[in-house]
Image: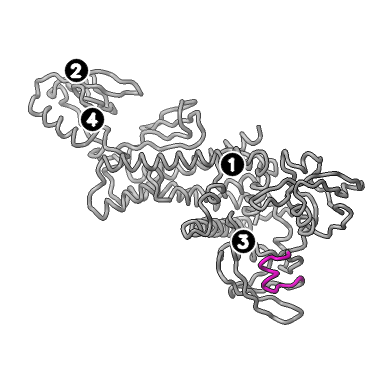
Amino acid sequence: MTAIIAFIFVIGVLVFIHELGHFLVAKWSGVRVEKFSLGFGKKLFGFTRGETEYLICLLPLGGYVKMYGEGVEGNFIVDKVEPGSNAERTGFKSGDRIISIDGLELKSFERWKQLEAVLENEPLREFEFVIERDGKNIEITSTAQDLEGSDNYSEKEYPRGFSNQSIINRLLIVVAGPFMNFLLPFILLPVVFMIGISVPAYLERSPVIGQIANGSPAAEAGFLVGDTILEIEGKEVSDWRDVNIELQINPDVLLDIKVDRGGETIAIPIKATATPEGLVALGFGEPVLAKVGGVMDGTPADNAELEKGDKILEINGQPIADWNEMASVIQKNANKELTMLIERGESVFDIQITPEPLGENGAGAIGIQVYTDEIIKKYGFFESIYNGVKEAANMIIEIVALLFGFLYKLVTGKIALGAAGKSLAGPILIAKISGAAAEAGFAQLLQFTCFISINLAIINLFPIPMLDGGHVVYLTIEAIKRKPLSQRSLEISQRIGLTVLIFIMFFAIYNDISRVKGDIVNSLSKVVNIFKQ
């Protein structure tokens, strides 16, 4: 239940702030906004204020702002009906949408112009109008003469219609949604710092290398335990947080890292190769205890009743000094029963556990995550604003670097398409992580909301029809050609875009379902580590 409520909160905030951007700039531009909806499908709640209907609908997976004249030119409106006019006596009202005339549907601006000419040439002929009013279709018999006293527009012509705005205004309306998603972290993160932010304690400490994984890039490059990292590509680093940020924004680059070794400054070149998840792992860091930070559901660790905080002292009688040593033993013993000596509080006892093979190489895994000591950092009002704005900027830079670094690897073939597809996450995973963040605290939930908001902003700007980025492409083409795309081109491109989005969503949900039994906590760990940094 916590996950569902947290998910609705996160998605609700993101959809509201995104659509609010479109809405505010549309109103500022003078566009008539017909609907502002949170969610899709059946209306749960709604009211009309002014010319806009505000809705909350059943499916909370998105929302929309409906503007007159937006999209395909197939809507025609009775804008104004003069009191006492023939049009009013015939039954027309302001806001009526003309669906068809004599059975001919008004699907295009050209069709409207053709019928408009017929109406002008035969003013006394009776025509059968089908109009839409308050969601219902109504039939009205009228002559062209009876329409006197009304103003009728196609949405393309409608003075306050979206299509009648300048390209600049339409562009501003389109990008306002993603802009608001980028803006949200600058609003929420100062609040997080006022509440108190939980961060891994090691991020605040000096970057002294406490362990190096065997066979890792760091080991091969010549780093040693005790080295203090001073600079990365000429930029000074003062703590592990600085180190992490510099590594994430420089994937697949031969880095020049300067370290202090016994009072001597040494430059060590190393390739910052990213993992398939887009994270950079060089194999050095602070000493990590062989301590359980979390247990994944349905895994060997869960079956063996390991708990968060358990410390692993020995495996098959072999003393375990740190996490890397423990992981090495587990990975080499897939499908083999191991005896672990566990310290829990003041108790010490043995358990039997059999690692499961995972991945292409079949390395053993038991389903636990790293234990991280955390500290609560709380600031005053002005410090919170400063640190929140700084954190928001860092978060955007880091996520943009990670995402585009990942896309670059995909395009250049450094990451296989299948591996890239497996990294997609859908609503189930987002709901799980939302629930875990909510359980960790309201500040963590707000942090996660910021993380998703930035991703949503970036993805929405991708040049895919049906997304805001697709509309930017349409407007760019219109500016170059000095005329909009044809209705048929719009329809075809939007069908293609919708198909692509449905495929991506299907694949993401499939991945979510496949993760539920094993990878969910691991995925959570990776994401939480990103937005905690």
Q: CA distance from mark 4 to mark 3?
A: 56 Å
Q: Is residue 479 above or below residue 356?
A: below
Closer to us: 265 or 159: 265
- Residue 46, image x and y in percent? 46, 27
Residue at label 3?
280
Residue 202 falls inside the magenta stretch: no
- The region drawn magenta spans 214-225
Q: CA distance from mark 1 to mark 2?
A: 53 Å
**Please, what is the three-letter code of the amino acid marked with disc 4?**
Leu
Q: CA distance from mark 3 to mark 2?
A: 70 Å
- Bin the neighbour count of mark 1 within 10 Å (Cα to Cα): few under 14, some 14-19, many 20 and up: many
Q: Quadrant of the N terminus?
A: top right
Secondary structure of the residue carrying tag 1 is helix
- Residue 78, image x and y in percent? 24, 29
- Residue 137, image x and y in percent? 30, 20
Q: CA distance from mark 1 to mark 4?
A: 42 Å
Q: CA distance from mark 2 to mark 4?
A: 17 Å
Q: CA distance from mark 1 to mark 3?
A: 23 Å
Q: Is residue 308 above or below residue 238?
A: above
Residue at label 2?
141
**Coloring basis for residues:** one colour
Residue at label 1?
430
Residue at label 4?
106
The structure residue drawn at horizontal position 73% and vertical position 65%, both measured from the top left corner, is 214
**Please, what is the three-letter code of the amino acid marked with disc 3?**
Val
